[in-house]
Amino acid sequence: MSTILQIDSSLFGSQGQSGQLARQFVEKYTQTRTVDKVIYRDLGSEPIPHLTAESFQGFSLPEEERNEHQKSIASLSDRLISELNEADVLVMGLPLYNFTMPSTLKTYFDHIARAGITFRYTEQGPQGLLKGKKAYILAARGGEYQGTPMDTQTALIKHFLGFIGITDVEFIYAEGLAKGGDAREVALGKAAERIDQLVA
Ligand SMILES: Cc1cc2nc3c(=O)[nH]c(=O)nc-3n(C[C@H](O)[C@H](O)[C@H](O)COP(=O)(O)O)c2cc1C
């Protein structure tokens, strides 16, 4: 019995390659595991507003002292965190845009990194407060970077998720999608094989 949270962040919504791979993963996962619920967030089609000083400062105010804008942003952030808390498994469609994550995903991260709620600072350093979750990241890329110093995206995503306590993270790559020839089909075939191995 588990809950999956699928988060896509392609410009093309669920039609993006990363979203299609994430959907493929969820479909196959639900065939081999008991899943009660799938929560879906499409950050490309329904972007979250950028944080501002006003909205960020509202996070640390008591509810009754927040203005209307701060209340609405804090309530959105609370909802996003509650979806994460509910999920046992996080499935993320992750495009590579200009060598990093989509700005919509970065904005989502800005809303879920909340001191005292998803992480805290201790004498031993920062401690992530989300526990017992597994993340699968379906990374779609025009070029090929995996295992090279150019792949800063993998480390960044792992670091961020680890910071909030999600340390069990598996990447599935579809790389070289823009190379032409049969590279796209080969990459998608490899990603599908990896998905099959992981859900078996
Ligand atoms: C705005 C934009 C920027 C991109 N930047 C890169 C890049 O820096 N490196 C790369 O390998 N591919 C890049 N691509 C290609 C995407 O990684 C590729 O199309 C991938 O399928 C994107 O995932 P999506 O289809 O889910 O949106 C870019 C594509 C777009 C639309």
Image: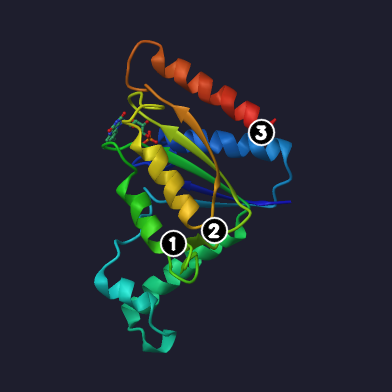
Rendered view: 181 above or below 199: above
Disc assigned to residue 199: 3
User: Under tag 2, what secondary structure?
Assistant: helix
Q: Amino acid at mark 2?
A: Leu
Callout 3: 10 Å neighbours few (<14), some, many (20+)? some
User: Under tag 3, what secondary structure?
Assistant: helix
Residue 9 seen anywhere in this rendered image of the structure: no
- Label 3, label 1: how far apart the Cα atoms are: 28 Å
Callout 2: 10 Å neighbours few (<14), some, many (20+)? many
Place of residue 198 in the rendered image (x, y in percent of width and height, measured from the top left): 63, 32
Q: Amino acid at mark 3?
A: Val
Place of residue 98 in the rendered image (x, y in percent of width and height, measured from the top left): 26, 37
Ligand 1 visible in quadrant: top left
Place of residue 123 in the rendered image (x, y in percent of width and height, measured from the top left): 47, 68
Q: Residue at x 32, y 17 (%)?
A: 179
The numbered mark, 2 or 3, whose residue comes first in the sequence reads: 2
Disc assigned to residue 148: none
Side (left or right) of 47 relative to 6: left
Q: Amino acid at mark 1?
A: Ile
Q: Which residue is mark 1?
A: 112
Disc assigned to residue 84: 2
- Label 2, label 3: how far apart the Cα atoms are: 21 Å
Place of residue 33 in the rendered image (x, y in percent of width and height, measured from the top left): 72, 41
